Image: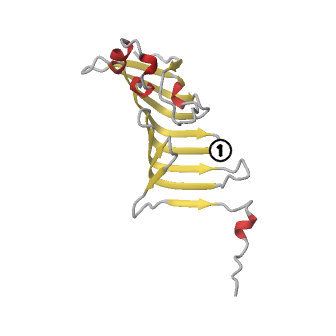
Amino acid sequence: MNIKFYSKFIIFLLFLNLNADNKQSPFSKIEISSDKATVCKNQNNKNIFNFTYQENVLVKFADGSSAKADELEIKLNTGKNKNKNKNKNIVNEKLENLTIIEEITFNKHVLVQNENKTVTADIAQIYPKTKICKFSGNVQINQTKVNPKDLPISTKCDNATLDLVTEKIILSGNKDNPINTTISLEGYPELMNPIKIKK
């Protein structure tokens, strides 16, 4: 059936907080809207469900960040949760053991926004349990100046891996398409003054 429908789903899930200072995990609440959506059970594993959202995909995370793409795929593993629910001391268990989202994949025309930072790419893959996000294909990372200490910067590369906990980014390019970074010093006159060398 090729019936176009509007879907809006709010998924409430428990996850380990990303940082020790109890900042809200972006995965504690995920709101997804799209024009089409399908859900199917994996034929080889009855505990795995694949959610696919297509056309005008918009995702809003609990920390205020958002993502857009042509297509979104979410892989859920409900089997990880069954044994834990039988445990009366579940409150004392680490929340990371309850993670049922294994992978979130955005495909085509990906745009991720978080405050004054944006990332565009062909593909973005998020692994909630390890808190790793991988971008690939025509990756461009931009930061605009909003606060006085913000440094406007733009980077283009083939691939980027972001650790959501440490915020460390690893970029990669190649001989034909090297990493290209532009840093704008406008608004930082102290950095543009010539260095005085004592004689």
Residue found at the far bottom of this picture: 199
Q: Tell whether 76 sits left or right of 44.
A: right
Quadrant housing the N terminus: top left
- Residue positioned 58% across, 55% down in the render: 154
Question: By what rule are the colours in the image chosen?
Answer: secondary structure
Quadrant housing the C terminus: bottom right
150, above or below 91, in the image: below
158, above or below 100, in the image: below
Q: Nearer the viewer, residue 115 or 35?
A: 115
Q: Is residue 75 visible?
A: no
Q: Nearer the viewer, residue 68 or 166?
A: 166
- Residue positioned 54% across, 55% down in the render: 155
Q: Tell whether 16 sits left or right of 187.
A: left
Q: Tell whether 20 sits left or right of 127.
A: right
Q: Tell whether 173 sits left or right of 148.
A: left
- Residue positioned 65% across, 44% down in the render: 116
- Residue positioned 27% across, 20% down in the render: 45
Residue found at the far left of this picture: 44
65, above or below 100, in the image: below
Q: Is residue 82 visible?
A: yes
Q: Secondary structure at mark 1?
A: loop
Residue 132: image location, x then y, percent: 44, 40
Q: How many marks?
A: 1
Dot 1, how many residues are within 10 Å of its Cα: few (below 14), some (14-19), or many (20+)?
Answer: few
Residue 48: image location, x then y, percent: 33, 21
Q: Amino acid at mark 1?
A: Asn
2, above or below 56, in the image: above
Residue 109: image location, x then y, percent: 50, 40
Q: Which residue is mark 1?
A: 116
Residue 121: image location, x then y, percent: 49, 45
